[in-house]
Image (cartoon, rainbow, N blue to C red):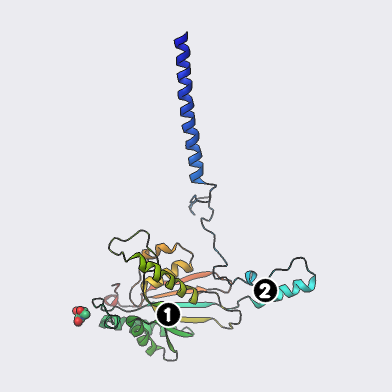
Amino acid sequence: MRRHFHRIQSFAKKSLKVGAVVVVGVLVYKELSGNGNNVLHASWTTNYEPTVKWNSNWDRREPQSLVQPVRGGGDAEQADYHQKIDSQTPKTSRHLILIRHGQYFDNATADKERFLTSLGRAQAQLTGERLKELNLPYTSLISSTMTRARETASIIHKSLPHLKHVQDDSLREGAPIPPEPPLGSWRPEQKQFFQDGARIESAFRKYFYRANPEQTEDTYEIIVCHANVIRYFVCRALQFPPEGWLRLSLAHGSITHVTIRPNGRVSVRALGDHGFMPVPQISYS
Ligand SMILES: *[C@@H]1O[C@H](CO)[C@@H](O)[C@H](O)[C@H]1NC(C)=O
């Protein structure tokens, strides 16, 4: 009888332990799966919920964020508020035409010796002709100050001589953010990410924003710069994880066309388009 009691007692203890483990397990599972915020619901299933919502005030230019709301207030105050919102609402779009420079000599260390190869010059020529053929109402031609970008822009300039060629240091090539997944063969110092990352982000904020409310016509800015910079811009503009930039690949002289609409929505009309290049002229490195 006593032995039997002991057995029951030991069984009860074991059950308690098993029970505790199960409870802890359930709690850990609940904690990890959260309230659903971290659960990926694939878009091809019927339980679709966006994993990340579009931030409509990504450029801090949403009219509602620029005008102080009125609380209560009479008709006059309400009318004044709506008038202010209207005056802060963009009416036009901004198009950013991002061009990767042509192939260049990457065997030199000094930037001025890292100029375009003859293929690189041919690519820039083809890109210029393509831009002219597209016949968009271009408003500016901006390039990075690096030799390969300046040269590419100068060649493009010949096809679009009515534009003024402006240069900008903030568009120089660099390491925007440590890529995920990491690439074994490409691992610049963390310091480089720390410095370049902030500078390339500053270039993003300088060029990516919805139109000013005063802008009366759509703008088409040609920006000749670099693969890492363009890839980071595209990820940021689309609100995709920026650390995924290295998963994109852009050919030399390729065209990436980003549109920013008056309401701040962004769409990529072309990504690394090089379909206008004859096959022997296509290169990536
Ligand atoms: C790079 O390579 C090219 C072509 O092979 C050559 O003409 C040039 O002198 C090289 N530059 C350097 C700095 O090694």
Residue 105, given in percent of the width and then of the height, sits at 25, 78
Inter-mark Cα distance, 1 to 2: 31 Å
Residue 111, given in percent of the width and then of the height, sits at 30, 80
Would you name the residue on which mark 1 appears?
A: 223
User: Exactly how many numbered labels are in the figure?
Assistant: 2
Outermost residue, front side: 191
Query: Residue 125 is drawn in which quadrant?
Result: bottom left
Depth order, front residue of 68/40: 68
Residue 64, given in percent of the width and then of the height, sits at 64, 69
Outermost residue, bottom side: 162
Quadrant where ligand 1 appears = bottom left
Query: Residue 165 is drawn in which quadrant?
Result: bottom left
> Which label number is shown at residue 68?
none
> Which label number is shown at residue 85?
2
Q: Dot 1, crowdedness within 10 Å: few (<14), some or many (≥20)?
A: many
Q: Earlier in the sequence, mark 1 or mark 2?
A: 2
Image quadrant occupied by the C terminus? bottom left
Residue 108, given in percent of the width and then of the height, sits at 24, 78
Asked whether, in this view, residue 121 is left or right of residue 222, the answer is left
Residue under the point 46% across and 73% down: 202
Secondary structure beneath label 2: helix
Q: What residue type is labelled 1?
A: Ile
Q: What residue type is labelled 2?
A: Ile
Asked whether, in this view, residue 282 is left or right of residue 88, the answer is left
Residue under the point 36% across and 87% down: 154
| Beta carbon at label 1 within 8 Å of ligand 1 | no
Outermost residue, right side: 74
Depth order, front residue of 198/139: 198
Q: Dot 2, crowdedness within 10 Å: few (<14), some or many (≥20)?
A: some
